[in-house]
Image (spheres, helix red, strand yellow):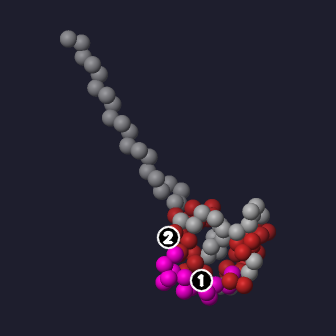
Amino acid sequence: MPLEEIGWLRRGACRSSDPELFFPLAPTPSQEARAKAVCASCQVMEQCRSYALRAGESDGIWGGLTPEERRRTRFPEGWRRPAAPEAAAPEATAS
């Protein structure tokens, strides 16, 4: 992480929390709610969320979002268009 990226980390509300709250081995809805409550009061929540989305963080609660919520933010439903149908192969003609 570049030096300019870590300035906001020092001001994060999570800094004094147990890292296990944000990076549990087996997350539960209760744990996620507690982590999100810490994020909700954080002065750098937007920077944290923006970083996690840009960096593609795949684990933990970042900026008040779970990994699944970040995936949905980065790749909303329908973001992929179906592949163009292949052109029908011309039928062979008899000579």
Q: Which residues are magenta?
A: 1-14
For residue 29, above or below residue 92: below
Residue at the image point whose x is 64% and y is 84% from the top: 12
Left or right of 38? Residue 69 is: left
* Magenta region includes residue 10: yes
The residue at which mark 1 appears reads as: 9
Residue 15 in the image, given as x and y percentages of width and height: 68, 83
Q: Amino acid at mark 1?
A: Leu
Left or right of 56? Residue 64 is: right
Q: Which mark is residue 73?
A: none
- Mark 2 and mark 1 lie on one chain; the one further toward the N terminus is 1
Q: Amino acid at mark 2?
A: Arg
Nearer the observer: mark 2 or 1; the answer is 1
Left or right of 49? Residue 95 is: left
Task: Answer with the quarter of the image where residue 29 lies.
Answer: bottom right
Q: How many circles with numbers are drawn on the protein? A: 2
Identify the secondary structure beneath mark 2.
helix
Query: For mark 1, does the 10 Å Cα neighbourhood hold few (<14), some (14 to 19), or many (20 or more) residues?
Result: some
Q: Which mark is residue 54?
A: 2
Task: Answer with the quarter of the image where residue 9 lies.
Answer: bottom right
Measured in 3D between alpha carbons, the distance from the residue under mark 2 to the one under mark 1, in whole angstroms, is 15 Å
* Magenta region includes residue 72: no
Query: For mark 2, does the 10 Å Cα neighbourhood hold few (<14), some (14 to 19), or many (20 or more) residues?
Result: few
Residue at the image point whose x is 74% and y is 66% from the top: 24
